[in-house]
Image (tube, helix red, strand yellow):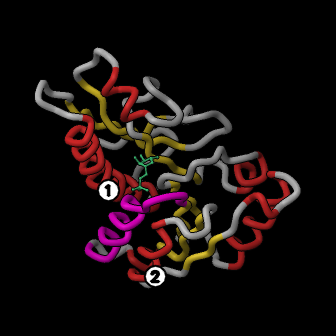
Amino acid sequence: VGVAVFASGNGSNFEALVHHSRKHAWADEIRLLFCDRPGAGVIGRAERLKIPAIQRSPKEFADKASYERWLLGVLKEHGIDRIVLAGYMRLIGPTLLEAYPDRIINIHPSLLPAFPGKDAILKAYCHPVCVSGVTVHLVDEGMDTGRILAQVPVSIEKGDTLETFEEKMHQAEHRLYPEVVQKWIAGEIGIKEQYS
Ligand code: GRF
C-alpha cells in the first residue's frame, strides 16, 4: 500500500505517523508528504525525516477541480493508494473522493459530531463540557462528517489551561492516529469494523 500524508501546518501528526511506521515496520508505505501551504513547518519535518515532499498552493490553479486533477497525477506517479489527512485545512473535492473512495482518512481534535471544523480544541475548552477527545474518521464531502473509525476521550480538568488541555489533546492524537492508520492500511478496520 502506498500512503500519502496531506498536511497544511505544523506537522506533528505527520511526524508521529512516520516515527510509528519506522518502529512498527510499515515505513515503506508512507511515500509522500503533500503540503498545500508552501513553507509550512511540516516541510522541514519531511526533510529531516527524509520523506519526499511536494508543496503547491491551490491558488496557482484556476479552480479546485484543476488543482485536484493535478494532485491526482502526482499521487498516481508516486503509486499512492491511500491518503492520510493530518491537519490538511481544506475540504476534499469530488475529483479526489471519486478516485479514492473510502481511501481517505482524517483526524479531528474533538469527539465528533461535536465541534466540527476549525478551532475544535478552543471550542471544547470554552464550552461547559468536561470531556472532549480525538476522532479518526473516513473522509466524505462534508466537513468532518465521514464514518467514525475510532475515538478516545480527553478530559478537561479544573486546573487545565488552554495550553495544558491542548497538550493532552495532541498527545492523544499522536498515540491514536498512527495505530489506527496502521490497522486501516492493513485492512483490519474500514467501512464496517471499528477500531477497539
Ligand atoms: C491536529 O489537531 C489535527 O487533529 C487537526 O489539525 C491539527 C494538526 O496538527 N486536524 P499538526 O499539524 O499535526 O501538528
Residue interval drawn in magenta: 7-23
Q: What residue occupies the far right of the structure in this picture?
A: 62
Please give the name of the residue rendered at 42% of the width and 43% of the height, measured from the top-left corner.
Answer: 136
Which of 66 and 55 lies nearest the eye of the viewer? 55
Please give the name of the residue rendered at 36% of the width and 53% of the height, measured from the top-left corner.
Answer: 177
Establish if 71 lies above or below 120: below
Which of 187 and 147 lies nearest the eye of the viewer? 147
Please state if 103 lies on the left or on the right of 61 as rendered.
Answer: left
Check disc 2 and give the amino acid type.
Glu
Residue 18 badge: none
**Secondary structure state at the residue bearing disc 1:** helix
> Disc 1 designates what residue?
179
Please state if 66 lies on the left or on the right of 174 as rendered.
Answer: right
> Disc 2 designates what residue?
47
Please give the name of the residue rendered at 33% of the width and 23% of the height, measured from the top-left corner.
Answer: 126
Q: Is residue 50 among the parts visible in the rendering?
A: yes
The dominant secondary structure in magenta is helix
Please give the name of the residue rendered at 54% of the width and 81% of the height, measured from the top-left corner.
Answer: 52
Which of 168 and 182 lies nearest the eye of the viewer? 168
Q: Position of residue 120 (x, y in %)?
A: 42, 33
Which of 25 and 6 lies nearest the eye of the viewer? 6
Q: Is residue 118 magenta?
A: no
Q: Position of residue 159 (x, y in %)?
A: 11, 29
Please state if 109 lies on the left or on the right of 72 as rendered.
Answer: left
Please state if 85 lies on the left or on the right of 11 as rendered.
Answer: right
The quarter of the displayed image where residue 153 is located? top left
The quarter of the displayed image where residue 19 is located? bottom left
Q: Residues within 10 Å of mark 2 (few under 14, many from 20)?
A: few
